[in-house]
């Protein structure tokens, strides 16, 4: 897959990957011509229990390896105490 064909979308609790691939191959021999075309689509959705900080998500591709960093959203541990009257 080429990185130009990748589509990455991220939400608070989900990540969607999609890519299209179009390969055309042509071989010429002494007395023949052979031509192939292949088209494929890839789609994958991932759900997460923890919320993702969508502003800090980053992706890179090096030597055909896709790396996506998804930092967790920092939780503010605000514990509210309330009084219950009887």
Image: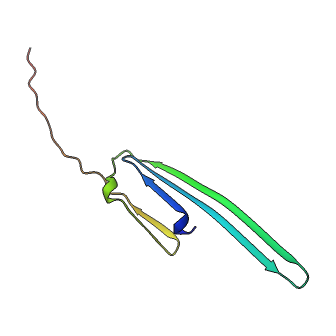
Is 7 rendered above or below residue 13? below
Q: Residue furthest bottom?
A: 30
- Image coordinates of residue 78 in percent, x first then y, are 15, 41
Question: Horizontal placement of 51 versus 27: left or right?
Answer: left
Q: Quadrant of residue 70?
A: bottom left
Q: How is the image coloured?
A: rainbow
**71 or 12, nearer to the observer:** 12
Question: Horizontal placement of 36 versus 71: left or right?
Answer: right
The C terminus, quarter of image: top left
Picture residue at 8% right of the left edge, 17% below the top? 85
Q: Residue furthest right?
A: 31
Picture residue at 31% right of the left edge, 56% below the top? 55
The N terminus, quarter of image: bottom right
Question: Horizontal placement of 51 versus 63: left or right?
Answer: left
Q: Residue furthest front?
A: 4
How many numbered callouts?
0
**71 or 33, nearer to the observer:** 33
Picture residue at 72% right of the left edge, 64% below the top? 38
- Image coordinates of residue 21 in percent, x first then y, are 63, 63
Question: Horizontal placement of 12 versus 66: left or right?
Answer: left
Is 56 rendered above or below residue 79? below
- Image coordinates of residue 80 in percent, x first then y, are 13, 34
- Image coordinates of residue 11 in percent, x first then y, are 39, 48
């Amino acid at each position: 897959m080429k990185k130009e064909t990748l589509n990455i979308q991220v939400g608070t609790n989900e990540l969607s990957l999609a890519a299209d691939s179009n390969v055309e191959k042509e071989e010429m021999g002494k007395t023949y011509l052979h031509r192939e075309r292949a088209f494929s689509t890839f789609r994958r959705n991932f759900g997460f229990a923890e919320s993702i900080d969508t502003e800090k998500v980053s992706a890179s591709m090096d030597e055909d390896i896709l790396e996506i960093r998804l930092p967790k959203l920092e939780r503010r541990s605000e514990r509210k105490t309330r009084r219950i009257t009887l």
